[in-house]
Amino acid sequence: MKFLSYLINGISLGSVYAIIALGYTMVYGIAKMLNFAHGDVIMVGAYAAFACIMNASLPPYAAVLVAIVVCTVLGVLIETVAYRPLLSAASSLAVLITAIGVSYFLQNVVLLIFGANAKSFQSVVSLPNLKLADGALNISGVTIVTVISCILIMLALTAFISRTKTGQAMLAVSEDKGAAQLMGINVNGTIAVTFAIGSGLAAIAGVLLCSAYPSLSPYTGSMPGIKAFTAAVFGGIGSIPGAFLGGLLLGIIEILAKGYISTELSDAIVFSVLIIILLVKPTGLLGRKMQEKV
Amino acid sequence: MAMLEVKDLNVYYGVIQAIKGVSFSVDEGEVIALIGANGAGKTTILHTVTGLVAPKSGSIIFEGKVITKVPAHKIVSLGMAHVPEGRRVFAQLSVLQNLKMGAFTRKDKDEVEHTLEAVYRRFPRLEERRNQLAGTLSGGEQQMLAMGRALMSKPRIILMDEPSMGLSPILVDEIFDIIRSVSAGGTTVLLVEQNAKKALGIADRAYVLETGTIVKEGVASQLLEDDAIRKAYLGE
Ligand SMILES: Nc1ncnc2c1ncn2[C@@H]1O[C@H](COP(=O)(O)OP(=O)(O)OP(=O)(O)O)[C@@H](O)[C@H]1O
Ligand SMILES: [Mg+2]
């Protein structure tokens, strides 16, 4: 029973990682850049929801919607203001350093507005716990909502990419920006949409994460951000199913390591597994070999 | 009035000038060849015409409209398609997905189906392989896909960058037959080639490019007889 409950918690945490990892992997796949500020967008989303619930007394679903809107706009702003001017001209190193700068910027803006003290986040999920096996297995409402959200997001995103023109444009841009433009695809617009989607998902992840682990500070996003990035690499960066799989596995490994080995060592174990996987399969679990251009 | 007119084009990569005051024109219905050695600037000219590279100065006029500053993604819907050097098909997408990308900006869905059928008639091999990933096609098939993809936009002018590159002699003949029939179908063709003999063989007029400058122009059949051209480009 203990194992089962660890597993369920792992899947739940992994679902949050997966939702965050989608943002990393889509932006990497399409804009070919690592958006290291992605983790902080999660944090901003959680603060936006927090402020709506605490200060404006909005109902939880409205708070989530506001958080999504705030993060979507923020994501597009970050892309157009901070990254776009660099994408064509500068080296990828310049973009990376800018991303780190954006990350600190977001943390400090939130620090200024909300202060350094951790806030106690009020869960947006009011579903009762699900008690199975005569109460031996207790699944929280947040866990259920998180896992279902992750599955729905995956399905919706897959359908979006295969069924819509914007989705097809993303595929083309991810392969060859120049050829995509010759097809009539607005590359900058497509990249902006990618940031918008990734950041909107980050808001959802932030709210779900803080509903499960209610302590919210300006640094709340960093560690999950890094873990989700790891998950994206683990699954194969650029691959959407890879982000899903990588996130789930990472969450499960982390919770099992916490439960059976040691809480202090769990992060070390998670990253060790990553290193081993990458040694065996450098492109990640579902990553494909870089196709050589003829 | 020319269908496409390029006037006094100057293009730089950083401080290096790749194109030096190039002017040329393409009339409706013509096949125009642009020939020149490696690094002469042929690809740069095509890239500048379709907006992938911005010129320092000069103007590009297509059907009376100045398109010098029109962004690359707005060119195809004006009726100009570009088959890029090295094919650049979307390797991870299927043949059919690639062809549909060519019609990305078209709103007339039923008409797109007709165009697709026409492309399949022209390239039966693409229909046979429509579900195959483009990256797994042979070089010749990829070239056909790149051309088919461009034709999916129903262009009035098609720019082709070295379509015969890296192909066997039989395939080269096949590709040139296709170019001829595309032209016969009413599409104007601007053809960039290193295979000067073949290109001059199907072109109406031609321009010869050397290190960013047009050094000769004229009726293709006459250029074929030109001693200097024969020496430099036909290996005689
Ligand atoms: N992106 C670039 N950055 C810097 N220089 C470039 C770039 N692209 C081309 N050049 C230079 O510009 C000149 C013209 O190149 P271009 O590719 O237009 O030649 P080309 O005639 O198409 O040659 P080829 O027959 O080999 O395709 C060359 O000297 C080339 O080195
Ligand atoms: Mg070239």
Image (cartoon, rainbow, N blue to C red):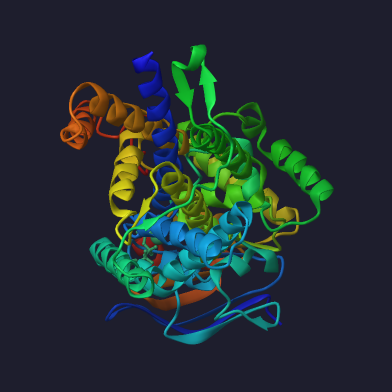
Q: Residue A250, percent across and down? A: 32, 32
Q: How many marks?
A: 0
Question: Could you tell me if residue B164 is visible in this image?
Answer: no
Q: Residue A171, percent across and down? A: 52, 46
Residue at 50 percent of width and 42 percent of height: B172
Q: Nearer the viewer, residue A85 or A36?
A: A36
Image quadrant where residue A56 sits: bottom right
Residue at 32 percent of width and 62 percent of height: A218
Question: Could you tell me if residue B152 is visible in this image?
Answer: yes
Q: Nearer the viewer, residue A8 or A167?
A: A8
Q: Is residue B163 above or below residue A258?
A: below
Q: Nearer the viewer, residue A172 or B83?
A: A172
Quadrant placement of the C terminus of chain A: top left
Q: Is residue B37 above or below residue A220?
A: below
Which residue in the rendered view is the most extreme toward the right? B110
Residue at 26 percent of width and 24 percent of height: A259
Q: Nearer the viewer, residue A235 or B91?
A: A235
Quadrant placement of the N terminus of chain A: top left
Q: Residue B54, percent across and down? A: 45, 77
Specify whether A223 is left or right of A79. Answer: left
Q: Is residue B193 above or below residue B228?
A: above
Which residue in the rendered view is the most extreme toward the front? A134
Quarter, ligand 1: bottom left
Residue at 50 percent of width and 75 percent of height: B217
Q: Residue B122, percent across and down? A: 69, 40
